[in-house]
Amino acid sequence: MTNPICVLIVDDQTLVREGFRKLLEVEADFEIAGTARDGEAALINVEQLYEQQQPPDVILMDIRMPRMDGIATTRAIKERWPEAHIVILTTFDDIELIHAGLHAGALGYLLKDASAEQLAATIRLAAQGQVLLQPDIANKIFASLTSGSGSSEERVPTEKARSVSLSAGGVEQLTEREHEILVQVAHGASNRQIAENLFLAEGTIKNHLSNIFGKLGVRDRTQAALKARELGLV
């Protein structure tokens, strides 16, 4: 029997915390590590869980909280425990804050009015380190990044784009294969999907991603996807 997915819920609203707890407790593969009402309490909880050698597999993180908000908390957790998997809890109108949270190191986001099925599926994906970019919100985020630089419609990469130099800011040039992989990451594809699309092994995709992260100066898939959009690569 595999170990349950350990979840920490961080939200300043008691009803939200307890609501998520009750929804997750009915799932056989989930275990609630605890709850926290703000960022400061969350940091204490995470530290205690690591000391007990039972770190949370996924942290559900509200953005708007008193004392220490979700963005600052996400940044603090990722700086100390970079392997942490954090999912932002938000509403559809928090586009700018979602963007800031992703840059702070969150894997993605979950709308607070999500169904029980969506909640469970999101946590299972996050536990595996998958990027979580819900299409409707992702389109709004990426449109805000590219506003003023042409159409917000999805663009098909050209050969010129594939060979684009990223020398600005000291970033090395991506190879054609790395660019192909980055484009698919930016569209939310998993390692397995990319491997199938490019007829490569998953381990090869992971190696390419490590090289891509280094060249772009980012820590994870989400930041790589955002960086790709900012640079106009996709």
Image: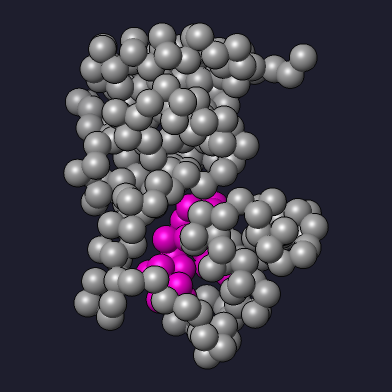
Q: Residue at 61% of width from left, 51% of height from top? A: 190
Magenta stretch contains residue 176: no
* Above or below 176: residue 182: above
Residues 123 and 113: in front is: 113
Q: Residue at 54% of width from left, 68% of height from top? A: 183
* Above or below 6: residue 180: below
> Is 95 left, or right, of 124 in this rendering?
left
> Is 156 left, or right, of 42 in this rendering?
right
Magenta stretch contains residue 218: yes
Quarter of the image that includes the N terminus: top right
Q: How many marks?
A: 0
Looking at this rendering, what residue extends furthest in the bottom direction? 160
Residue 76 appears in the rendering = no
Residue 10 appears in the rendering = yes
Residues 57 and 197: in front is: 197
Q: Which residues are magenta?
A: 214-234
Quarter of the image that includes the C terminus: bottom left
Residues 151 and 64: in front is: 151
Q: Position of residue 195 (x, y in %)?
A: 72, 59
Q: Residue at 52% of width from left, 85% of height from top? A: 158
Q: Position of residue 167 (x, y in %)?
A: 50, 83
Q: Position of residue 110 (x, y in %)?
A: 37, 35
Q: Position of residue 57 (x, y in %)?
A: 57, 26
* Helix, strand or loop for the magenta stretch, by majority: helix
> Is 229 left, or right, of 211 in this rendering?
left
- Asked which colour scheme the image uses, the reply is one colour
* Above or below 230: residue 1: above
* Above or below 166: residue 160: below
Q: Residue at 39% of width from left, 40% of height from top? A: 109
Residues 56 and 149: in front is: 149
